[in-house]
Image (cartoon, rainbow, N blue to C red):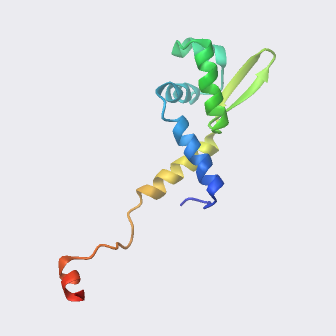
Amino acid sequence: MIDSTSVESFEERARAFKALGEPTRLRILAHLQAGESCACKVQEALDVPANLLSHHLKVLREAGLVHGTRRGRWIDYRVEPRQLELLASVLATVAERPKTTCRTTDRERTAAA
């Protein structure tokens, strides 16, 4: 179940889903699922220009999907599992079948008329 009904919470989750809507960002997350990785290693693995990778990592950071830790002049990135769990809970909630429906049958409509 979705744990919060605040507008800000839904806006944050929508921003995260939007960030996931770009194939390169999904590739970055898939690469980082194996564990923390330096941006240079991500660039090598995905063959993405440095400026484009930087942009995608910024979007993922702002969406709370990855976290970067500076190590000298390098930045190591890792997936933020809690944010992914929240997004999964949204999808699970939406996927749940409703217990009741508002649909009326033709017979019920005729009887009500």
Q: Quadrant of residue 80?
A: top right
Furthest residue toward front: 113
Q: Quadrant of residue 62?
A: top right
Q: Position of residue 40 (x, y in %)?
A: 65, 13
Tag count in the figure?
Answer: 0
Against 31, residue 19 (above or below) is: below
At 41% from the left and 60% from the top, the residue drawn is 96
At 34% from the left and 73% from the top, the residue drawn is 102
Q: Position of residue 101 (x, y in %)?
A: 34, 72
Front position in the image: 110 or 58: 110
On-image quarter of the C terminus: bottom left
At 65% from the left and 26% from the top, the residue drawn is 36
Q: Position of residue 107 (x, y in %)?
A: 18, 82
At 66% from the left and 33% from the top, the residue drawn is 61
Q: Is residue 112 left or right of residue 87?
A: left
Against 64, residue 108 (above or below) is: below
Front position in the image: 108 or 84: 108
Against 15, residue 9 (above or below) is: below
Q: Position of residue 110 (x, y in %)?
A: 18, 84
Q: Quadrant of residue 65?
A: top right
